[in-house]
Amino acid sequence: MQGGPQHGPVMVINQGSKRETGREAQLGNIAAGKAIADIIRTTLGPRSMLKMLLDAMGGIVMTNDGNCILREIDVSHPAAKSMLELSRAQDEEVGDGTTSVIVLAGEMLSVARPFLERNMHPIIIVRAYNKALQVALDVCDSIAKTVDTNDRDVLLKVVRACVGTKFVSRWGDFLCDLALQAVQQVSIDLGNGKKEIDIKRYAKVEKLPGGDLSECRVLNGVMFNKDITHSKMRRSIKNPRILLLDCPLEYKKGESEVNIEVMKDDDWDKLLALEEDYIKDMCSKILALKPDVVITEKGLSDLAQHYLIKGNVSCIRRIRKTDNNRVARACGATIVNRIDEALESDIGTKAGLFEIRKIADEYFTFIEDCDDAKACTILLRGASKDVLNEIERNLQDALQVARTVVQDPRLLPGGGSTEMHVAVKLLEESNKVDGSGQYPFRAVGEALEVIPRTLCDNCGADTLRVITELRAMHANGQNATSGVDGTTGKIASMDDTGVWEPYQVKVQTFKTAIESATMLLRIDDIVSGSKPKQSAYGEALASGQLAGN
Ligand SMILES: Nc1ncnc2c1ncn2[C@@H]1O[C@H](COP(=O)(O)OP(=O)(O)OP(=O)(O)O)[C@@H](O)[C@H]1O
Ligand SMILES: [Mg+2]
């Protein structure tokens, strides 16, 4: 490797790549963040707009869920991409607030712009932002109110406020009821005040196009898209004894290649007889437990099926692992993975009804009327696939919010009032911060006002007047619950409108927004566009070595 000043410039970065450094990179990131925030700003709040998106496969997505919109759009700027990750993280963490977090992060970035233009070092801005976050969290702690999670009405109110901003809000409380019911069903008390609520694994949403919304319900048990393996088996069994397996009911095939040399004709018969005996033995062990239903995750051979039919057992094969787990929790069974080890206690007896039902053109297995089911299926019916998908997304939000509140029963007022309260507090505290850090510290407050401002904008209110008035009301730590009524655009107390949000959602929104903004501000170099791989010929051609040949 030769190089150095006397040999011309050293090429370190590939020529094909694009590079932005310093101020240019920072301002570019800010612009990208703001652009993303502007896209979804109109979908915040109860008067929000839906977006209709055409995905890569040509399908239509209609939604106002921030995360979902961002997932569908295709962006190229790396900072914009990292903003998308934000809302995904928010979605996974708490499920709601995915629009707020992006709008807020975009605003945090754009208020930093004047400081950068005035040559303030990003580190100063970042430090001030982090200090402001700390103050914001303290304020949230001080105005949070704790609710009783056993009070169904309170929970319902919180879920309703969350779903109120959604497409399904037109169907009122119905969906909130479903969400609450599902969460209560899957929650397990772990003692000392802790609860395990695993919605992802134990509350499954099944969408069946057709029917109408009023037919949606939470099953007291589970349901999945499978039929029994043979038409002679019973299709409806009361109080079934259910055996769950995750091993195959067929002759075991060798793990690696197995060769058998058959020398005589009757050796072959012996071999088959061995297989038959093996299956017969397996089935007799199963029948000894007297199950009515056998469900396996693996295969089921014809022969095994024959013996099981003789024992009057209904079988279902190749059920998904996740479905099997839910069935186990619903009927109190344990999944057995070696038939030799199956015990009486592994049999699930808590289900009231096993039934195969035909809905539209497909067969579904229902395991219902369970006694204390700890898993459930939420059955959604609706006119079309697009509507169902949106209902499912809304339901997921509602489920997550219900779960979050049950786990952490603290609430913060919504409608932009928490944000406003924090903003005013930051303004008041800003002169305690020394040095130039106080300007970005104050700017965080201004940025937080974007939430009430956007809520106002989206319902066509006189934004400037409302925000000024609201700011005055929050002065000196008063009126913490005053915010914007998102439907009328007037100032209202959240005690009256009942819009309260889970503490976790709000705090997570602040944390994520500020952390991501500070992260983007610390970037001063963007190298992008590494060349796509070319053939050696193509490369030579591109670099001009072949020119003239
Ligand atoms: N009736 C209402 N009046 C005033 N503000 C409301 C009302 N309902 C909800 N809000 C406010 O609207 C914001 C939530 O809006 P929205 O649900 O559209 O977005 P998100 O929760 O941030 O994102 P997403 O639900 O898409 O994940 C919160 O700040 C909440 O306080
Ligand atoms: Mg929401």
Image (cartoon, rainbow, N blue to C red):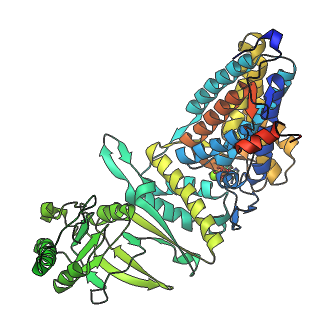
Q: Residue at x 85, y 51 (%)?
A: 461
Does residue 84 appear to the left or right of 367 in the view shown?
A: right
Does residue 453 appear to the left or right of 429 in the view shown?
A: right
In the rendered image, the vertical position of residue 118 relative to residue 310, given as above or below = above
Residue positioned most to the right: 548
- Asked which quadrant contains residue 113, the reply is top right
Q: Position of residue 108 (x, y in %)?
A: 75, 32
Q: Residue at x 64, y 29 (%)?
A: 136
Q: Position of residue 425 (x, y in %)?
A: 70, 26
Does residue 464 appear to the left or right of 126 in the view shown?
A: right
Q: Position of residue 175 (x, y in %)?
A: 55, 65
Image quarter where the C terminus lies is top right
| Residue 440 visible (yes or no) | yes
Residue positioned most to the front: 549
Does residue 60 appear to the left or right of 215 in the view shown?
A: right
Callout count? 0
- Asked which quadrant contains residue 214, the reply is bottom right
Q: Give the camera-side residue of 529 and 321.
A: 529
| Residue 477 visible (yes or no) | no
Residue positioned most to the bottom: 232
Image quarter where the N terminus lies is top right
Q: Give the camera-side residue of 21 and 449.
A: 21
Q: Give the camera-side residue of 442 and 361.
A: 361
In the rendered image, the vertical position of residue 543 relative to residue 374, given as above or below = above
Q: Position of residue 17 (x, y in %)?
A: 77, 34
- Asked which quadrant contains residue 126, the reply is top right
